[in-house]
Image (cartoon, rainbow, N blue to C red):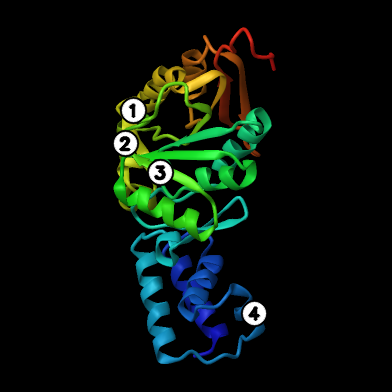
Amino acid sequence: MTLHTALLQGTRLLEDAGVAVPRLTAEVLLAHALRERREYLFAHPEHELLELEWLHYGRHLHERLKGRPTQYITGRQEFYGREFRVTPAVLIPRPETEHVVEAALAQARGARRVLDIGTGSGALAVTLALEMSAEVWATDISPAAASLAMANAARLQALIRVVVCDVMNAIAPQSMDLIVSNPPYVPLTQKEGLQREVRDFEPHVALFAGDTGFEVYDRIAADAPRVLRPGGWLVLELGFGSLEYVRNLLSPWQDLRVEPDLAGIPRVIAARTQPSRNSPGR
């Protein structure tokens, strides 16, 4: 079977099953089976698949048809122009979370010490370490996630320090200039309404915050003033419908700002603590 025919058959299978972007998914899975880049498929449509390549491709298609996300099949996801390794132990980084990076760079580019809460794959921590040249710390309650974040940092030549703890309870007082987080924010009451790929395959500890979806926001807002230095920034990704709650939560803070994503949906909220009297205002 040629690559051209394999792509057509794979696309048809995925399309009939209602899988999103079936052609692109087939291309990614076939390239992964061949251990080649997607460009190879278009340059060599006449390539005859070896038996082992066909077996790998068939297995990848079968996994995707069962609902397994493509990123968990390939073990890869791009974030801010860099390729990260992902496993079912971590949430798959989304393009929307790149807005957290943009807000952090805009509001606190001069930060010397940065903390990423709930780092998962390390996408935020690694990106900020490379973009800001800051000393970056990261926390995660999952040892498997912490291990993967360290592996991604090593592969991308970023220096980060990862602590296994709940939220930031192991972080020293007034030790950070900037805290960022894409926290769990899905209410447990919405579990059954999630896409199968998310509900059945991504780690629940990284998805669900509690009955309201605001529980982790509450904990971060309560403890961040202890960890941040005077004038330090907090930058959080917003879940759908969480803006008003989180804005009220941070109303005592200074310079509160909300940034929308490309669709105009409020995606990031940023605020800072009271600067010390001896530090210049911003």
Q: Position of residue 50 (x, y in %)?
A: 45, 91
Q: Which residue is mark 3?
A: 162
Which quadrant: the C terminus?
Answer: top right
Residue on which the image places disc 1 = 169
Name the residue at 64% across, 79% down. 42
Q: Nearer the viewer, residue 257 or 224?
A: 224
Tag 4 residue: 42
| For marks 4 and 1 on the same chain, the one whose residue lies earlier in the sequence | 4
Badge 4 vs badge 1, beta-carbon distance below 8 Å: no
The numbered mark at residue 70 is none
Label 1 amino acid?
Asn
- Give the residue type at disc 3: Val
Q: Nearer the viewer, mark 3 or mark 4?
A: 3
Please identify the quarter of the rendering in which residue 275 is found: top right
Answer above or below: position of 116 versus 14: above
Judged from the image, the secondary structure of the residue bearing numbered disc 3 is: strand
